[in-house]
Amino acid sequence: MDDLREKLFYESKNGYDRIGTEERMAVESYCREYMDFLNEARTEREAVRYAIEKAEENGFKPYVPGMALKAGDRVYRSNRGKALMLAVIGTEPLEQGSVIAGAHVDSPRLDLKQIPLYEQDELCYLRTHYYGGIKKYQWVTIPLELHGVVSLKSGELVEVCLGRGPEEPKFVITDLLPHLAADQMKKTMAEGITGEGLNLLIGSTPYADDGKDRVKLAVMSLLNDAYGITEEDFLSAELTAVPAYDVCEVGLDRSMIGGYGHDDRVCAWAELRAIFDVTEPRRTCVCILADKEEIGSEGVSGMQSSAFDCFMEDLCAAQGAALRRCLENSFCLSADVTAAFDPLYPEVAEKRSESKMNHGMAICKFTGARGKSSTSDASAEIVGYLRGLFDREKVVWQMAEMGKVDQGGGGTIAKYMANRNIDTIDAGVPVLSMHAPFETVAKLDCYMTYKGILAAYRD
Ligand code: MN
Ligand code: MN
C-alpha cells in the first residue's frame, strides 16, 4: 500500500531531505555571494551597476550595435543605467529561439517628492511618495538611508548615498507613542499611517543666524557641502529612502536570509550567477534585470518598453535572423518571487497549492487575481517541460499559487513577455513578509532558483 501511495500520489518534500552535504555547502557559498549583492544593490541603479561590474569580471562586454557575434560571445546592454540585458550567444541560430530569464531589480520604497524639503516646528523633513505596494505602517520607526541621483542643469549627474556606512547617520519616520495613540489605534491598518504622513526626519539643529527656516538652512548647507546641490536641484532628482540595515542570516540554524529587497533581487542574482556559469550554450541565453515591475512594468526601463525587443533585434540582426521567429521559438522564465506559505497567516492561503519555505524553486503556472485576470497562464506543455528538465537536473522545485482564490493576487513581468509571443512561465523564490522593509527567504530556495535557471540555460 505504501509503495502504491508513493507511486501514485504527489507530495512536495522538504528540500533538506532531498540534498546531500555537498549541495548544502554549495547553498551556503551561493548565498554568501547573494548577500553581498543585496547589501550593495539598494536601488535598481545600484543593482545594474553591481551586475555590470560582475559581468565584466566574467567576460561580458558592452554590446555595440553592429557588432559581429559568434557562439560563446558574452555581451550586455544597459538600459539607461536602470535595467540590464545580458546574452551569451548560442551555437544554434537565433531563429531557433533563445532561453530568457527575466527578473526585476526595483523594489518597494519611499521616493522623495520633487519639492521634498521643509521645516516644521524647528525640525526638518523630506516629503516622500511611496513606490510600489507597501503597508505604510511598516515603514515608520525603522532606520532609513537615502540613495539616488541628482541631475544638475549642467547635465552632470550627482550620485547620492547617505546612511549606508555603519558610521553614517540614518533617517527615520516617526510614529505616535502608544500613550497618545487612542484615536490612531481605532483606525484601520491602511489608514493609521497615511501616504502624506511618511515624512523623513533629517535634521534638528538651527543655522547659527536669525531669520526663518534655520534648521532647513542648516540641512541644505550640509547637502550643499557634500554634493554641491541647492534646493532647486531636488526638482530633477531621483532620491529614495530604503531600509538602513544590512542583510543577515535568520534563525538559530542560519537557514534563512533577512533583508530589504529580496523581491526581486533574489531572482536577479540567481539569473546573473547562472548566466555567468554558462559557457557555450546550444541556444542563446538572455538575462534581463528589469526596472519598474513594482509599478506595472511601465516606462522606458520597464518590461513593457521596447528596449528588450531592440536588444534582441540587434542580436538577431548579427545573424540575419528575424526577431519574430526568434521570439516565437524562445522560452522565458519570468524569475520572480512568490508568497511563501506563512503558518502565522494560514487563513489567506490554500495550503495544498501554496509554495513552502525550503521546498525549492517555486513554479507559478498563473499569477493574477480573481478569475485569473491579468495573467498569461502558462500552458500545460510548458509546465510539463520544466517538470522533466528539473527532475533530470535534480532541481528541488515545487508548485506555487498566490493565496486563496479571491483573496487578492499579484502580477509579474510574465504577461509582458508572453504578449511578445514567447512561451513564458513564472518561477522563483518563495518569500515571507513580501514587500516589507525586511523580507525573509530560505537559503535552499535561493540556491535552487539559481540551479533551475542554469538548467534552463544549459538545456
Ligand atoms: Mn517581484
Ligand atoms: Mn513585488
Image (cartoon, helix red, strand yellow):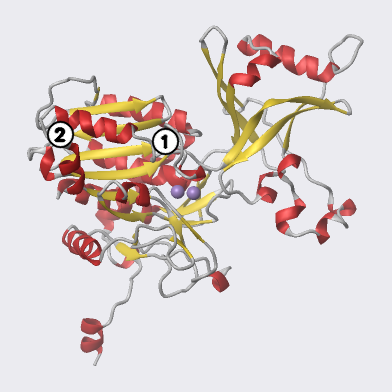
The spot of residue 115 in percent (x, y) is: 70, 24
**Location of residue 401 with respect to 116 vertically, above or below:** below
Query: Separation of disc 1 and disc 2 at Cα?
Result: 25 Å
**Location of residue 363 with respect to 61 vertically, above or below:** below
Query: Which label lies toward us, 1 or 2?
Result: 2
The spot of residue 334 in percent (x, y) is: 33, 50
Secondary structure beneath disc 2?
A: loop
Q: Is residue 153 among the parts visible in the rendering?
A: yes
Disc assigned to residue 344: none
Closer to us: 212 or 41: 212
What residue type is disc 1 on? Phe
Q: Residues within 10 Å of mark 1 (few under 14, many from 20)?
A: many
The spot of residue 28 in percent (x, y) is: 35, 48
Q: Which residue is mark 2?
A: 89
The spot of residue 417 in percent (x, y) is: 32, 47
What residue type is disc 2 on? Ile
Disc assigned to residue 37: 1
Instruction: Give residue 201's quadrant in the image.
Output: top right
Residue at the image position 41 percent from the left and 25 percent from the top: 81
**Does the beta carbon at disc 2 come under 8 Å from ligand 1?**
no
Residue at the image position 60 percent from the left and 49 percent from the top: 134
Left or right: 71 with respect to 294?
Answer: left
**Does the beta carbon at disc 1 come under 8 Å from ligand 1?**
no
Closer to us: 390 or 441: 390
- Furthest-top residue in this view: 154
Closer to us: 55 or 250: 55
Q: Residues within 10 Å of mark 2 (few under 14, many from 20)?
A: many
Left or right: 396 with respect to 356?
Answer: left
Secondary structure beneath disc 1?
A: helix
Q: Is residue 255 among the parts visible in the rendering?
A: no
Mark 1 vs 2: CB contact within 8 A:
no
